[in-house]
Image (tube, coloured by chain):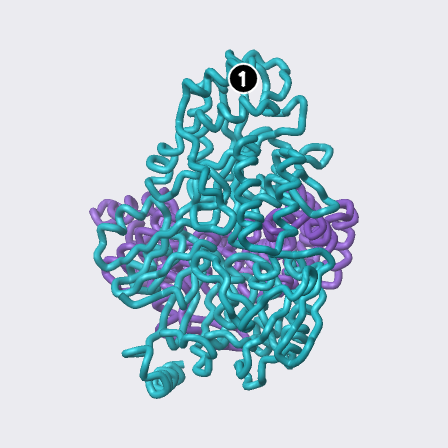
Amino acid sequence: MKTTTTLAVAAGILISSVSLASAEKLVIGLASETTSIDPQFHNTGPNNALSLHVFDRLILQNKTQGLYPGLAESWAPVDDLTWEFKLRQGVKFHDGTDFTADDVLCTFERAPNVPNSPASFATYTKGKTLVKIDDYTVHFKTEVPYPLMGNDVSTVAIISDSVGCGGTTEEFNAGTAAIGTGPYKFQSYTPGQSATFVRNEDYWGEKPVWTEVEFRPISSAPSRVAALLAGDVDVISGVPTTDIETLKGKSEITLSQGPSNRVIYLHMDQFRENSPFITAKDGSEIKNPLLDVRVRKAISMAINRDVIVERVMEGIAVSAGQLLPDGFFGVSDKLSPLAYDPDGAKALMAEAGYADGFKMTIHGPNDRYINDAKIAEAIAQMLTRVGIETAVETMPRSVYFGRASSGSPDGLPEFSFILVGWGAGSGEASSPLKALIHTNDPDKGYGATNRGRHSSPEIDAVIQEALATVDDAKRQDLLAKATEMAMENVAIIPTHFQVNTWGAKKGLRYIPRTDEYTLAIGVVKE
Amino acid sequence: MTVFIIRRLLQASIVVMLMSIIVFFGVNVIGDPVYMLVSPDADQDDIAAAIARLGLDRPIWEQYWIFLKGAATGDLGNSFIFGEPALRLILYHMPATLELAFSALFLAIAIGIPLGLYAGLYPDKAVSKGIMAGSILGFSLPTFWVGLMLIILFAVELGWLPATGRGDTVSVLGFETSLLTLDGLSHIFLPALNLALLKISLAVRLTRAGVREAMGQDYVKFARAKGLSTKRIIFVHVMKNIMIPVVTVMGLEFGSLIGFSVVTETIFAWPGMGKLLINGILQLDRPVVVAYLMVMVLFFVVINLLVDILYSILDPRVRLQDQNK
């Protein structure tokens, strides 16, 4: 072990005299455990982040999820139904074989068909047919115009035709099939304990600083912080908000923070005449007040977002007035967080015929988002103050999401008023619009996470138009327009964007990413 | 003896069968794993496909029947999250938990019995009172808190030991163990101590009570009168008698050492079965939870059996009773 490290270090110094003064090993403590080395087995954040070290994508995402060329040098639509990908030449896999169009074709063949996969990449590969034009040109064909090609393709890890595509998940975990083109080579993987990668000295892109990287899952937050303080690990993800003040005072720790693509929002029952968790103040049944846009707006006005950010989140959040923070593709520059106005809220309630208010229960998870249960409690108090007597019920996410999605006897969302979060994996506004705002339509695959079942044909039309518009400028406008309409209708109530915190030992710093990934290439020396 | 063992085995298989029903149905009424697994980007089709792939579209009794059929051949189902056989995952993580539990048991006996003996022989000394007061703390302080304090003291402040994780391991008879490397020992010490704390206290109290009771008994007086040395009286005659309850309780507690390792493993990021279980519960990896509980049931049954056998070796009365039948 030691000799190999020394050799790698020596080799690193010999080969790259440019990028580093001294080559070192980096140890990263991760908040969430990865479940596999197979990059196509389980489509989940921690796995995708880990696999980025060994496996490149045709298109990569930068720290704010902007797309830039990976194994594809360029990609562009040649007609409405065809995207042409020009592949990078001279790239070699870790086993020395050349990267060509065949690897791309077999990758997209395997990705949706991994046995036992709990979350398949079929979500991104379906509806696309790949045609090999020559060794370095691939056409992606679709049946309808598809502007999100780049975003979809950027999620799929390219594996090798010779060993990867025929490989089983076990073979990936053992390392024999874990052959990519990425900046790091697979070295070892012990589930639940560690994953170790060594630098790919022949990497086509910018050579990574660290010669060896080890990832260790440390799920308990205080232990993770202690491991950083003790010097067991160099960098940790998911610094708990309660520890941030203390750590700021320690000179041996560098914290870095950045907003994520995750919006925390409230979904409101807009499809039942009588909502199960809403009654009049005396407990009698009433018509669901959330069907009235004025009531929804009043709720949004009654929420003091500054208090949530400053007090509940201890300043580690950004208040939200739309679905994604500034700077993302498809956000509207006209929207800002709704100002806190309890009197205006009361007036609106009276106008809607609810001057006396009503009773409601807010449901939320207590182990999914940063401070989720506390946020639900704060919101309940704010609503109670304007006359909506709100009870709080929080539960573990394992119970919560099933009930929130399909917990009622007829398989519909069970709750009336819920706290949830949404991370835009694609890094642009169509992701939340399509999933949360569009009418629930199983045939088209839209509105799959629309747990409030808000439904507006006008907004649907704009979203659908955006999803069929390949021109970026036009699509940006359409997405912004759809967002504005959704906020006007108060389809959902965004409260804040989560901010993530990483900790590093002195001399190092992590460059925050909006996708919440923790990558070795993001660790820089100061 | 043989009859005794056969009878116990029969009882055990009924227990295991009943547990399988309780565990399987109990675990399957909680939550909906599909929403824990699929990517948020998944649309309705993807979700339906995931449900079918995991077999969750079948009625629960059919799922149980499939589980039983598999269990009969040693297959407890595939983990939803890892895609591997649940039993294999558990066996893979078991050595880490076992070595932790054995280390804790060792500490409990090596520290608890001498301290208890001392406190029992000299109950009025200040040191003994200190030991007893310490054992109350050992009983009442929560494991997760003590674990964090140990990390802060030994890893962060003093920097003597690593905070988390399992160190270098070596393979012995196909099992990975960290007990044979210095790095491994330095990693296992804190979690083992944390896990052992409660059992040390238990051993102290049991031994002390046993010693105090035995010292007043006739056979001790007789031994004294016979002129035996104090050393011989204590270590041969007294110890032999007080070891019966100590062995019984420690044996039974070994099961709970494995069970309670969940908290310690989480705090110390120890890659054992406990951590596997807690992840399984949090993410609704039902096959892993069911398989873990089934393995645990078997464990307890076997431990109880072993304790009974040890009993009969330590206490000739038990042996004689059995022969008389």
Q: Nearer the viewer, residue B247 or A458?
A: A458
Instruction: Note whether residue B325 is visible.
Output: no
Viewer-nearest residue: A151 or A115:
A151
Chain B: drawing colour: purple
Report the residue at 64% width, 46% height from top.
Answer: A465
Residue sitting nearer the eye, A2 or A297 = A297
**Quarter of the rendering occupied by the N terminus of chain A:** bottom left
Residue drawn where x is 50% and y is 37% of the image? A265
Would residue B274 appear left or right of A343 to someone viewing this image?
Answer: right
Q: Which residue is mark 1?
A: A358
Q: Is residue A526 visible?
A: yes
The chain that hosts pointer 1 is A
Residue nearest the viewer, comparing A119 with B6? A119
Q: At which x and y percent is residue B113?
A: 36, 56
Q: Is residue A174 above or below residue B137?
A: below
Colour seen for chain A: cyan
Amino acid type of disc 1?
Phe
The reply, left or right, for residue A246 in relation to residue A458 is left
User: Vertical placement of B284 versus A76: above or below?
Assistant: above
Q: Is label 1 in a helix, a strand or a loop? A: strand
Give the class, few, some or many, for how many residues have Cα within 10 Å of label 1's Cα (few <14, many ≥20): many
x, y percent for residue B103:
42, 63
Write down the quadrant of residue A98 in the picture. Answer: bottom right
Residue at 56% x, 72% y is: A72
Report the number of numbered marks: 1
Above or below: residue A428 compared with residue A84: above
